[in-house]
Amino acid sequence: MTAIRVAIAGSTGSIGTQTLDVIRAEAGRYEVVGLGVGSSVDALIAQALEFRPKVVAVADPAKRAVVAEALPFAEVIADLADLAADADVVVNAVVGFAGLPVTISTLRAGKRLALANKESLIAAGPVVQPLRALPGAELVPVDSEHCAVHQCLRSSNRPADEVARVVLTASGGPFRGRTAAELAEVGVEQALAHPTWKMGPKITIDSSTLMNKGLEVIEAHELFGTAYDQIEVVVHPQSIIHSMVEFTDGATIAQLSLPDMRLPIGYALAYPNRIATPFGRIDWSALGRLDFEPPDLATFRCLGLAYAAGRFGGSAPAWLSAANEEAVEAFLAGRIRWNQIGEICDAVLQRHTESADATNMTVDDIVAADATARRAAQEELAR
Ligand code: MG
């Protein structure tokens, strides 16, 4: 069996390093042909010395020379989007809207996109969707909830007709059960203390506001074509059920596993097969209980904002995602309080205007919408 050639854009972050864990554990099955980073070159060099990729991409021009010197066997390129050329599968683990070129180039090249960068699909749905129909192009989600839904849908012969509801589970994050008043003074460290998942800072803050779940609602709509009225969110603090699909006959199929991102990563790499490494198994006798509760939409207003942006469509999801990125960055820098993240996103979304024909958007339209929304967010932040 020839090894499947894998490139990882954003290789030194949480998803990138866990992708390499999977590849290490599945000896001989995968070959790392490309690694790409923004500017974390020390970690990149260490990874490349172990995995010997043909190509490394370094976005930061000031750091390319040191990488080239340390890795004489590798070609050093500037653009992470060019990693798709030599790969069978590209793992897009770039954080935020910056991941859009990798999503586009991978699908355009007719390759499999293992998508951990949900923002590119959410913001640019109108331009990414047509690319999924290109020969060879395939989008397999790395997000744990969507990986779960993807698995549940395989149980139906006709998912488009037979799905009644997609139920996304949410851990509830570190602030589950707290009121808005109690959360007025929480700091960055508390927001970064996620109870069940170990992730990068941007998505961990998004989990604390439930914006992550809101973005995942839009992501589910884009990935599976499910109407917003048929997508529900339920809080499930143990993070054992990763999501569920209810079918027209009332049967619900759920996907359960330990909360470990290496499972969805391995699923996306191996699909339609499965990797042989379990990365932990559920101990049913020790599990005890699985709890469910409705999300608190008043305290966690970002979830409702995402439904509104998704239903509006066009560039509204791009505006919301951009506003959120700016607000989260300001929160992490200590410029705003935690509950201002939702306020900023709400204010920016209220300013949303459609500058292009929503049914015929180009990449440039999306990039322009992203920039306009970021300017609006900066104005709101300056108030
Ligand atoms: Mg998720």
Image (cartoon, helix red, strand yellow):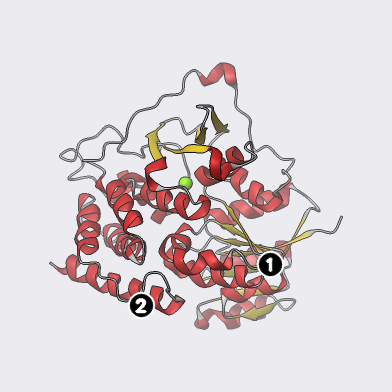
Q: Residue at x 52, y 21 (%)?
A: 287
Q: Residues within 10 Å of mark 1 (few under 14, many from 20)?
A: few
Left-right relation of 65 to 211: right
Q: Residue at x 39, y 77 (%)?
A: 365
Q: Residue at x 27, y 57 (%)?
A: 331
- Examine the image and state in which quarter residue 258 appears: top right
- Examine the image and state in which quarter residue 357 appears: bottom left
Name the residue type under label 1. Answer: Pro
SS class, disc 1: loop
Which residue lies under the disc numbered 1?
Answer: 135
On residue 368, the disc is 2
Left-right relation of 96 to 34: left
| Above/below status of 158 relative to 96 | above
Q: Is residue 260 visible?
A: no
| Above/below status of 281 relative to 218 | above
Name the residue type under label 2. Answer: Ala
Q: Nearer the viewer, residue 215 or 161?
A: 161
Q: Where residue 96 sits: x, y (%)?
A: 43, 63
Q: Where residue 152 sits: x, y (%)?
A: 58, 37
Q: Nearer the viewer, residue 382 or 373?
A: 373
Q: Nearer the viewer, residue 3 or 368?
A: 368
